[in-house]
Amino acid sequence: MRRTNHIVNLDPAAESFDYPVTMDIRELISLDDVMGELGLGPNSGLIYCMEHLEENLDDWLTEELDNYLDDDYLVFDCPGQMELFSHIPVLKNFVEHLKRKNFNVCVEYLLDSQFVTDVTKFISGCMASLSAMVQIEVPHVNILSKMDLVTNKRTIEDYLNPEPRVLLSQLNQRMAPQFEKLNKALIELVDQYSMVRFVPLDSRKESSIQYILSQIDNYIQYGEDADVKVVDFDPEEDD
Ligand SMILES: Nc1nc2c(ncn2[C@@H]2O[C@H](COP(=O)(O)OP(=O)(O)OP(=O)(O)O)[C@@H](O)[C@H]2O)c(=O)[nH]1
């Protein structure tokens, strides 16, 4: 899309890259060092690193961000651990910091398409993405990645624009009868939060990449006023 872009690594455990990385959290702190010096395990070590990043937002990050121009796009590649997006405020505070520095921010949430093999996994993927959406509170594009690896494309297509009634009946068939009310509530939630829809990404297809980039670009350009279909969720509307 002819935007000047720079890739930033925010994963303190990442070791090698197939692309140039312009900023790297490992210049500040690395998982190996934390595990070696503090005797932490991989997960608590990662959280320690991310909290250290949070403490250094005003120094390290602000200094680094000063190197970019107004029209530059920065792509922050985050670690995949779910708790960073669901209940630890580090990434929310990171995004808030970017917003204070006048960046327009858009989250791209990637879910491996191979994970979405049946209705329970689809709902679980939706819930995970939704928890990131409600925590981070910025425009958000959900992507089903690695579509080139999917052998049965029809199963996935059913989940791209899902019919609530079909989802509910599939879920009820899978679960014991006492879960019916819960199933109904979950499907209503997914249906009402229409932004939780996933867009397929096949990295071999230029059109697939362009479609997602144009959505992201739209959000970055116009922020929350972007022309993207959004349906408000009203928790009071239907008990
Ligand atoms: N076939 C195929 N492989 C992919 C695609 N995207 C990534 N991979 C490969 O999948 C493997 C895992 O990569 P990712 O899913 O990006 O995960 P990661 O960034 O290493 O790990 P986390 O960020 O912690 O989730 C790597 O070997 C990638 O080369 C894709 O679209 N198609």
Image (cartoon, grey):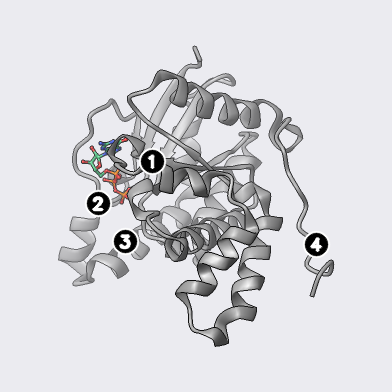
CA distance for labels 3 and 2: 8 Å
Q: Which disc is residue 234 wearing?
A: 4
**Location of mark 3 (residue):** 46
Extreme right residue here?
237
Q: Pick whichever, 138 or 101, lies toward us.
A: 138
Query: Which badge, 1 or 3, comes first in the chain's sequence?
Result: 3
**What kind of element bears circle 1?**
helix
Q: Pick whichever, 57 or 186, lies toward us.
A: 186
**What kind of element bears circle 3?**
helix
Q: In the rendered view, would you say 188 is above or below 54?
A: below
Amino acid under disc 4: Asp
Q: Position of residue 143 (x, y in %)?
A: 47, 41
Q: Depth-wise, is mark 4 or mark 2 nearer the camera?
A: 4
In the picture, measured across the screen, residue 35 lies left or right of residue 191, that is left
Q: Quadrant of the C terminus?
A: bottom right
Q: In the rendered view, would you say 76 is above or below 193?
A: above
**What kind of element bears circle 2?**
loop
Report crowding for label 4: few under 14, some 14 to 19, many 20 or more residues within 10 A (C-alpha): few
User: What residue is at 64 percent from the left and 32 percent from the top?
Assistant: 219
Q: Position of residue 25 (x, y in %)?
A: 34, 45
Give yes or no for contact between labels 3 and 2 (Cβ–Cβ under 8 Å): yes
Amino acid under disc 3: Leu
